[in-house]
Image (spheres, rainbow, N blue to C red):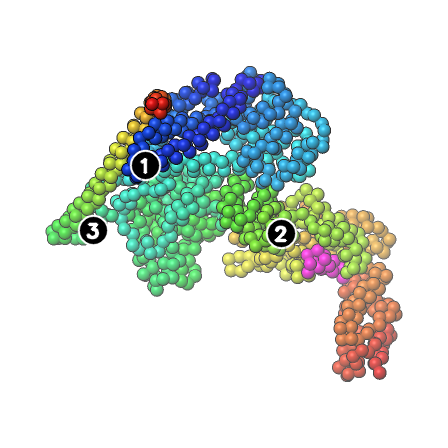
Amino acid sequence: MPIALAYFYWYYFEMTKDILRIFQGYLRYWVFFFSIKQTFRSLFSPWKMMDDPQKGNLMAEIFETAINSLISRAIGFVMRLFLLSFFFAIEAITIVVGVSLFVIWIFMPIILIWIIIYSFTKINV
Amino acid sequence: MFNLTRTRAYQAILSEPLFKMNKAVKGISFAIFSVSLATYIFYAFAKESGSWILPIISLFFSIMIISITIDSFYDSFVRKGRDKKRLEEVLDDPSKDRNLADYIDLETAKIFFNSLTSYRESSVSSSSLLFNLINSKDRRMLHILSRLMLSRDYIKDRISASKSENVIPCDEIVMEAIKTSVKRGGDRVSEGDLFCALSFLEPNMKKLLVELSIKREDIENVNWWGESIMRRIEFFNKFWEYDNLIRTGSVGGDWAAGWTPTLDRYSVQWTSIVGGRGYEEIVGYKEEVEMLEDALAKKGSKNALIVGEIGSGRKNIVHSVIKKSFSQQSFPEINNKKFIEIDLISLTSSLDSVEKAESAITACFNEAIRAGNIILIINNLQEFIDVQKAGVIDISGILLPYLNNSRLQLICITTYGGLHQKLEGKPGILQAFTKIEIKGMTEQDTLLLLESKSMQMESEYKKFISYQALKEIIIMTGRYISTPLPEKATSLLEDVFSFYSNKEDYVIDAKVVDDVLTKKIEIPVGALDVKEKNLLLEMENELHTRVVGQHDAIKDISAALRRARSGVQTRKGPMGSFLFLGPTGVGKTETAKALADIYFGSEEKLIRLDMSEFQRVEDIPRLMGSETQEGILTTKVRETPFSLVLLDEIEKAYPDILNLFLQVLDEGYLNDNYGQKVSFLNTIVIATSNAGYQIILESVKNGKGGEEIKEELLNNIFEKGLFRPEFINRFDSTVVFRSLTEEELLQIAGLQLEKLKKRLAEKEIKFIVSDELKRRIVELSYNPSFGAREMKRVIQDKVEDSLAQAFLADKIQNGATIEIDPEQFYVLIQNPE
């Protein structure tokens, strides 16, 4: 393959593949960084397992244990919800940036050539 | 086929001036873009119209971006040659007609380009190719040459001086290089692979490398090393890759995990330790790592018992799993877990009662189970099972109920000794574990580990270590230290750097390794120095300064030592092993003492055992050791591995003890009661016996010669069953000491009296030893059955006793000259005036 043709092959085939791979990598990375799998799996779990085990059979103790568990789970849920919100926000930004970069990449040669021609005309003027 | 012109690399080489020009365009456009942007910003601050600059900014910005993409195209595509053609297919089907030039990278193609007289040529002058390769500025070649301590100029001079023109077909060279590249897992032939091929095919280079003791595998190993460094640098530079991104860690992974207050107080976090090292790649142990992962992830009890000797790399296996857990490359049951060791020693030492300690340990286990994201580790499990010592807790009772809990993941580490002595007696505990045995790392993997560690140490100590030094570490530790790899090698590497840190020299070579190891184990290692070489060549003369007569015996011993130390000897076992046969008092023990003094530097390096003390089966534990006592032989040899072991009167030992020595003489090792190997490889073993001495006395009387006496003696020994033939055969030499002649006895008398003379000279008393005195002593002391042993007694009774009386009676003053009357043995004194 002639070098000039190889350049376009590299640009539109190899680099496009790389960009998509890196984009996918970043999407996976945020899933890892925010521990999404564990977070979803433990969405309603008590915060740091802070639910005291049931001490006895008396109704009062059972009620107290249930309340503790509920509060702990509520705390856990709220914290995890914050984490998930951050994750979704960053993931959305990543998608937007990634798609934009991808589109720019695809059209970049045309854009650049147009800019060069346009700049020359403006300079001449 | 090899046709360079039909490759993309050739096109790249031809268009290289354009790519160089592109780099210049990139630089210039960046400069103009920066300046114009700065000008625009300046105008903006000055509130003036800078809109005329905008077209310039956009123009040069666009040119810069285009240049950057072209540059990137050159670096990632043209130079690396990303091609679908696999190297392995060449080796799978070598007969297929293909252009081998397609399989070389750009830098290697340039070497061929510069070496071929015509680009359509398919053969090349090997010296021209080598010349261009050596001159290459590529980092791979620089690395190979520097690590192997090869001087570029020296190689060039040697090639130029040879004047021979060897023309080799290019496809033969490339094929050879492809084999090297495939071995290291490469996807293209690089300059390092080409250098490996030429070291094999280029005659002058081959000759030079033989002279420098550099083998092809050494070049391949260094090439491999360089390539792995470059791959790691490339990998770390690509910060955007997923595997790099995840090194930052994660957030929120342990929010569902419980608190562990007790465990936090008495634990060591292995995850943090491994993380602190950047989760570096751990070498080797692939199978063992997989076994550990399987054990921790299986259904039911998830406990693993890692068994191996200290220094065999047991912790490295856990570190590998930690790395995989961190980067989520392991099973879900292992990913994102924390690996925590319960520090039982600090726990028991900080709590003042056994009950509190047991309660704390139970709390640790409960917290780990409850947290749900912890894998517990207990190191040196054998120290805490069946404990006899005060102040150390026995956890076997606490451990048992938890082992069958599938929510607990536990890794225990122990030794073979611990397994056999403590755990095999507790089947309830042992059955709950998956046993993973670690035999130690291979030499090749240890070399990779040393290469990796040496890079860190070089930057820390600001030194450079040659490949030969690393290889020397592997060879010498294998030869002189019997513990398993890799720890003995990594420990020596650290010692070498630490020893050399305050020296001015920058380069650490093999000699430095030998010097450090010699100091460490007190055995002279490595090449013989001049002093030792002279000693070995003059061994007979040296021994004769202390031993009278026995020329055949001394000749045998000297020859055996020369063979052992020069590296000519092919059998394993001790440096030398001898069986001294002969009557009592003829110099057997004296020869052994002389050898210890001359060769090992001191008579203290003589380990002497009177085998008549080991005549019963109950005496075996005294030699080898037992649970309640250390072995006399095994302990002494372990403490002084470079020594002479003298087994006196070996015929009196219990027969099973002789069988033990068969292994020592054959393999050079003995297993003590703990199953640990004790090495005899750096000892000389001498056994003495006066079995069949009557044969020697008779034969000498009948005027028989050396070999005849020996044959008769050995036949007699075998007939009477005193020693088995297979025992005698294992010695390097059976040396017959014959009875002493009168002349020899006179010499011995002279030597003994000379010792007395020296002692008196220290008191400034001159002692004249007359020939008559010597003859008289020989006359009184000579007994064929007892040899010269009586002589000491006679000198003591007759000479020393008289002298003692004279001293006590103040008859002898300082500066006196004395003589002993040979008839009556009274002291003739001439005091100074």
Which stretch is magenta? Answer: B585-602
Name the kind of residue labelled 2 in the image. Asp
Chain on which label 3 sits = A
The C terminus of chain B lies in quadrant: bottom right
Q: Residue at x 27, y 30 (%)?
A: A96
Horizontal side of residue A71 vs B512, given as left or right: left
User: For the residues marked 1 and 3, what is the alpha-carbon distance in whole angstroms?
Assistant: 68 Å
Chain on which label 2 sits = B
Horizontal side of residue B224 vs B783, given as left or right: left
Is residue B99 inside the magenta stretch?
A: no
Q: Residue at x 40, y 60 (%)?
A: B392
Residue ID for mark 1: B43
Q: Residues within 10 Å of mark 3 (few under 14, many from 20)?
A: few
Residue ID for mark 3: A52
Q: Secondary structure at mark 2?
A: helix
Q: Which corner quadrant of the image does residue B53 belong to?
A: top left
Among the two numbered marks 1 and 2 on one chain, the one whose residue lies closer to the N terminus: 1
- Residue B429 seen anywhere in this rendered image of the structure: no
Residue ID for mark 2: B515
Name the kind of residue labelled 1 in the image. Tyr
